[in-house]
Image (tube, rainbow, N blue to C red):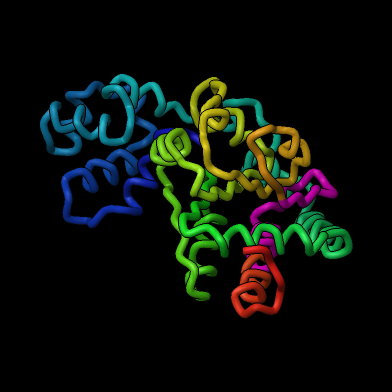
Amino acid sequence: MNLLIVRLITFLNGQTTETTNYHIAVTMLNHYDNICSMSIGEIAKLCDVSKSTVSKFARTLGFDDYIDLKDNAVFIENRFNNPLNYVSNIITSIENEGYNEYFDAIIKDIDFFKSHFDLSIFDRVAKEIYTHDKVMAFGLIFSESAAIDLQYKLAYNGKFIHTFQDDLVQENFLRTAKEDTLILIFTNSGNYLTKQQIRAGTPKKSFFSQTKAKIIVISSNPKVLDFPFVEDAIIFPHQTNYQTHTFMYHLITDLIVARYRKIKNNEVPYDR
């Protein structure tokens, strides 16, 4: 997905509607197709604010200036030639193959996971969540939705973990995280660990090697276990070309919370 769209939506989700920046963000989204051809003066006039206010807003979103924001406004479907992107993999496939194939793929992945999952990994993850006071859960876009889902599910059971939707805030936290922190990473492809997935050119990501936190990954890619900074992983291999991870994440977070409850209630032994 386009970086500017992601940051605008993330920004809006954390703002009240009365602020000037909220108005600028909504205006940009409502006129998104025109941003690439608009000068800072034109966008300022459209938003009924000064050019300096637009510049400050661009920096608020994490861009160097308005030019940087504008460069990241170009929306090209599957601009990074990723066949697993949402529209190409899900929507276009539904259009071409029909709904039955999609339903069958979801059922096939769930059935495979049901027959092959190892409960011990869920106990290990749940124990780490139970024994760490500082627990974070991160992902991008749909994977970040899974992190938020886990946050709410654990809160229902008295465990409060944290997440950030902002990709820059996630990265800064990862760089400086200490040994007392557990970080759960939701990444279907595993690319979150190595690439800046929503930035032009998908530049390499290296700060995982710098973090001191304990990293546990939830992914369809078993190769994430090869990274030296990954402590453990829950793997759910896809059985078709459909990327059904949004459904699989819900099952996995339910199982994590179910085992967490067992540990919290002393029904599953663990080493303190």
Q: Is residue 245 above or below residue 187?
A: below
Q: In this view, does 242 lie to the left or right of 141?
A: right
Q: Is residue 22 above or below residue 198?
A: below
Residue drawn at the location 36% of the way across and 36% of the way down: 32
Residue drawn at the location 60% of the way across and 48% of the way down: 186
User: Does 239 appear in magenta?
Assistant: yes
Q: In this view, does 34 lie above or below 12?
A: above
Q: In this view, does 87 lie to the left or right of 174?
A: right
Q: In this view, does 94 lie above or below 130?
A: above
Residue at the limit of the structure toward the right, as seen here:
115
User: Does 159 appear in magenta?
Assistant: no
Q: Where is residue 195 in the image (x, y as percent from the top left)?
A: 58, 28
Q: Where is residue 43 in the image (x, y as percent from the top left)?
A: 22, 30
Residue drawn at the location 23% of the way across and 57% of the way down: 16
Q: Is residue 7 left or right of residue 145?
A: left
Image quarter in which the C terminus is found: bottom right
Q: Where is residue 137 in the image (x, y as percent from the top left)?
A: 52, 52
Q: Is residue 102 left or right of residue 207?
A: right
Q: Where is residue 143 in the image (x, y as percent from the top left)?
A: 57, 49
Towards the viewer: 248 or 265: 265
Quarter of the image where one finds residue 250: bottom right
How many numbered tags mark residues here?
0
Residue at the limit of the structure toward the left, as seen here:
50
Tell me the magenta residue range.
234-255
Towards the viewer: 180 or 258: 180
Q: Can residue 167 be seen in this view?
A: no
Residue at the limit of the structure toward the front, as seen here:
272
Residue drawn at the location 48% of the way across and 70% of the way down: 155
Q: Can residue 257 be seen in this view?
A: yes
Towards the viewer: 240 or 112: 112
